Image (spheres, rainbow, N blue to C red):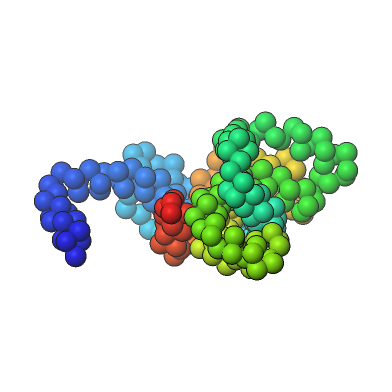
Amino acid sequence: MATTSRFDQKAQRRSPIFYIVVLLILAIYLFPFYWMIASSLKTQIDNNAFPPLFVFTPTLANYANVFADNPFALYLTNSIIVGIGSTVLGLVFGLPAAYGIARFNQKKLALAVLLARIAPGISYLVPWFIIFSTFNMIGSYTGIILSHLTVGLPLTIWIMIGFFEDIPKELEDAALIDGASRYGIFFRIALPLVVPGIATASILSFIQSWNTFMYSVVLSDSATRTLPVAVFGFLSYGGFDWGSLTAAATVVTAPVMILAILIQRYIVGGLAAGGVKS
């Protein structure tokens, strides 16, 4: 109670300048999203007007054109298949890897995972392309899902290491004394205790896969094209149809934004739980 009271008093003592700074930062980050949505509701003439129009008559024609001229249902399905596939595979391989790193204190291996996470994605693109070309996997769901593991797998491992490190070793020692195997401990004790971390890693991995463009644009074809690649198709050398382009971008961005807003407390709570050491 005393701690809560001190936090309340500190919040009350904040000057108006603090809130002004917060509003300015929010405005800087939110303005691109506002401009994207506003442009998607403008005609081509309004989008090309100078100075820019902030008051205009909205229209849904751009969205109608996007869905009429492009198989966005197919692109949406492809993004969902690739996102779920890469997320599931990331958990299948990432959870045991994170458990092994955490339980056997493999600091160097953890550092290698971190380096793989921060390495430029384009450094993996050429090897992926050569491998998939050799096995005729260009344009297949399998190839795209495996390439997206480059993004999702290190993220899953790095998040889950903290959760597995928080599990008391005494629980596992007691299970070993009772005759449980390492596999039994992992599946029956460790995994049930890190469900919040699994949910957090799954959500963030899916979002990363949903937004991944580089691997999809090179390794996909017309049948497996994902939503970010579809938006790229609206760019041309002859000129930009800003209305259709921003409408397509809004269609791609909206599901992830809505998902992030709905589950933000679970993501923050899960990351916070994984960051607290016993």
Q: Is residue 25 left or right of residue 206?
A: left
Name the residue at 88% across, 44% down: 136
Q: Is residue 278 left or right of residue 174?
A: left
- Please identify the quarter of the rendering in which residue 112 is found: top right
Q: Residue furthest front?
A: 177
Q: Position of residue 169 (x, y in %)?
A: 54, 56
- Judge whether residue 99 can be spotted in this image: yes
Q: Nearer the viewer, residue 20 or 153?
A: 153
- Please identify the quarter of the rendering in which residue 177 is found: bottom right
Name the residue at 77% across, 48% down: 143
Q: Nearer the viewer, residue 150 or 226?
A: 150
Q: Position of residue 120 (x, y in %)?
A: 60, 32
Vertical relation: 257 (above or below) 217: below
| Quarter of the picture holding the N terminus | bottom left
- Judge whether residue 248 can be spotted in this image: no
Q: Position of residue 61 (x, y in %)?
A: 52, 59
Name the residue at 37% across, 45% down: 29
Name the residue at 26% across, 44% down: 24
